[in-house]
């Protein structure tokens, strides 16, 4: 949860202080990247990457089965 808030907060700050418009695909990719890191810390058998989840959410079903 913290990584979701942190990623959105950084995008907000970049918009307000740097006048950079957010690239939503980049934000979504970062959310997947951080989520995978969090899941791996909880369960070392989760071997997928953030890119794997971004491309195909079926790996969650395959891993959890």
Image (tube, rainbow, N blue to C red):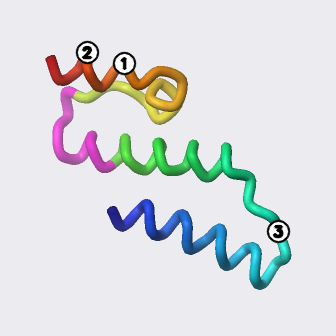
Q: Quadrant of the N terminus?
A: bottom left
Is mark 1 in CB contact (under 8 Å) with mark 3? no
Query: Residue 17 at what x, y percent from top left?
Result: 78, 84
Query: Residue 31 at what x, y percent from top left?
Result: 49, 50
Is mark 2 in CB contact (under 8 Å) with mark 1? yes
Estimate how packed mark 1 is, as few (under 14), some (14 to 19) or many (20 or more) residues with alpha carbons within 10 Å: few
Element assignment for label 3: loop
Q: Earlier in the sequence, mark 1 or mark 3?
A: 3
Query: Residue 24 at what x, y percent from top left?
Result: 68, 50
Q: Which residue is mark 2?
A: 62
| Magenta-highlighted residues | 38-45
**Left or right: 28 in relation to 18:** left
Q: Which residue is mark 3?
A: 20
Estimate how packed mark 2 is, as few (under 14), some (14 to 19) or many (20 or more) residues with alpha carbons within 10 Å: few
Query: Residue 16 at what x, y percent from top left?
Result: 75, 82
* For residue 53, above or below residue 26: above
Q: Which residue is mark 1?
A: 58
**Predominant secondary structure in magenta?**
helix
User: Would you say residue 33 sits in the magenta stretch?
Assistant: no
Element assignment for label 1: helix
* For residue 46, above or below residue 62: below
**Left or right: 29 in relation to 11:** left
**Left or right: 45 in relation to 31:** left
User: Would you say residue 42 sits in the magenta stretch?
Assistant: yes
Estimate how packed mark 3 is, as few (under 14), some (14 to 19) or many (20 or more) residues with alpha carbons within 10 Å: few
């Amino acid at each position: 949860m913290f990584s979701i808030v942190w990623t959105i907060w950084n995008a907000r700050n970049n918009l307000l202080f740097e006048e950079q418009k957010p690239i939503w695909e980049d934000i979504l990719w970062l959310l997947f990247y951080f989520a995978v890191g969090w899941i791996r810390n909880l369960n070392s058998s989760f071997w997928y990457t953030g890119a794997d989840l971004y491309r195909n959410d079926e790996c969650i079903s395959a891993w959890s089965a």
